Image (cartoon, rainbow, N blue to C red):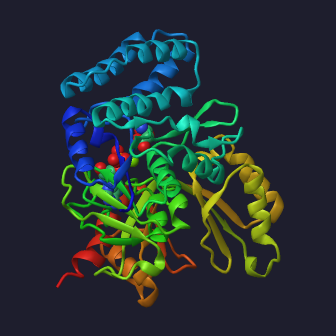
Amino acid sequence: MGVRVVKFGGSSLADAKQFIKVKDIIKAEKSRRYVVPSAPGKRFSDDIKVTDMLYECHDLASNNKDISKVFNKIIERYNGIISDLGIDLSLDADYTEIKEKLVNHASRDFAASRGEYLNGKILASYLGYEFVDPAEMIVFDDKGVFLLDETVQIMRRRLKNIENAVIPGFYGAMQNGKVKTFSRGGSDVTGSIVARSVNADIYENWTDVSGFLIADPRIVDNPKVIKVITYKELRELSYMGATVLHEDAIFPVRTVGIPINIKNTNDPDARGTMIVSDDTAEEMSKYIITGIAGKKGFASINIEKAMMNSELGFGRKVLEVLEGYGISFEHMPSGIDTMSIVFNSALIKGKESEVLSQIRKRVNPDHIEVERNIAVLAVVGRGMRKTRGIAARIFAALSHARVNVKMIDQGSSELNVIVGVGEQDFEEATRKIYEMFVLSGEE
Ligand code: ADP
Ligand code: ASP
Ligand code: MG
């Protein structure tokens, strides 16, 4: 019998009702042996995630303010779940210990990690599974860099003789023993690491949507589900803001080809999305594109200089200046006498005039300016390689909708086309591209 690793996100474990669904799912398949929970998420739209409350406790404590009010709300949430499930478990000793550590200035990562830790204890008790603390298995070096090989070795040994376990998501520990978390949404990464360590046949990632959708459901009405997507495509989309799965969650499983299945806790029979390697992605999408995603908050430095194209080292000099100021760029569309560098606008905050004057000094441009409030969209699809005129179609759809396109750039992999628009046009641009490739692709 194969092994499945199942990860449940915050909304899948937000209250006792959700825990009941989760147990039904796990018990329906004997192969669902290792379970990775997130901290309790939102029960309704303006609810607060436990993780956010823990960050708040940390911030209060670091200003020497009282954390009791917020911390009591956290206790209430967990105790509410325990009593609604009717399980015989008390976390009082944990609450006392955690509160004391928070008050005594435990690290931000430690604070955040307790959300998964406590939820894991409840889930383990409810399922009758062993609780295994990832702080003993998931290793980061002392700079905070995650160490995959060491982790896999340790985890493999630790889980070898354990039939069923609950392993909280989101955190591990550095070699000096201090708790360290992944970035937000990082329980997805934990699930992937566990899947790799136990050689799972499949990594099921259970969330609150019936799979990876072609576009963000908060922007496009009722977008269609992507049935099969490759790791590469997914990486492009999640990097660009489709937050269903953490952008780093594919690395541990990709090299060994363990497929990820995105599933919906609230609709367990829906097939969801399969994330697979290039060569196993037989089932092609019905549409030319696989998905669209995007983010706001970019800026670009636009440089003009006559004969730029023939000036040896021009680009290098500009990029060296940016490197010196710690600005990593995302895209660099260029013309014969123009070059633009698009980057996250937070990176230039407070140093804009210095950066520009350094560039002026190095390359003496005819004109240089910074443009802000840019949104970048990625249109991604393995089917685009075989189709001509994608960029032209995107351009036509957008200009028809009077969306001003600031940049359009085809990645060298031919797996994606990147489009830059003003932030105010972001949602409309997403909808227009969706219409162009998905709705008009319907027979
Ligand atoms: P979890 O708490 O289960 O980890 P997340 O909130 O991290 O869940 O991810 C699921 C959410 O991602 C969905 O509820 C949806 O609002 C959002 N989302 C953004 N883009 C997409 C997309 N392309 N397809 C599906 N969901 C998306
Ligand atoms: N609880 C963490 C967060 O809110 C990690 C996760 O949910 O994956 O970011
Ligand atoms: Mg998530």
Residue 26 appears in the rendering: yes
Residue at 25 percent across and 27 percent down: it is 81
Q: Give the quadrant of residue 245.
A: bottom left
**Dividing the image into 4 quarters, which one contains the N terminus?**
bottom left
Residue 306 x/y as whole percent:
73, 77
Residue 225 against residue 409 in the figure, above or below: above
Nearest to the observer: residue 69 or residue 177: 177
Q: Give the quadrant of residue 272.
A: bottom left
Residue 98 against residue 420 in the figure, above or below: above
Nearest to the observer: residue 141 or residue 285: 141
Residue 85 against residue 34 in the figure, above or below: above
**Dividing the image into 4 quarters, which one contains the C terminus?**
bottom left
Q: Give the quadrant of ligand 2.
A: top left
Residue 132 x/y as whole percent:
47, 36
Residue at 76 percent across and 58 percent down: it is 359
Nearest to the observer: residue 269 or residue 394: 269
Left or right side of 431 for 409: right
Residue at 37 percent across and 12 percent down: it is 69
Residue at 73 percent across and 51 percent down: it is 355
Residue 204 x/y as whole percent:
35, 56
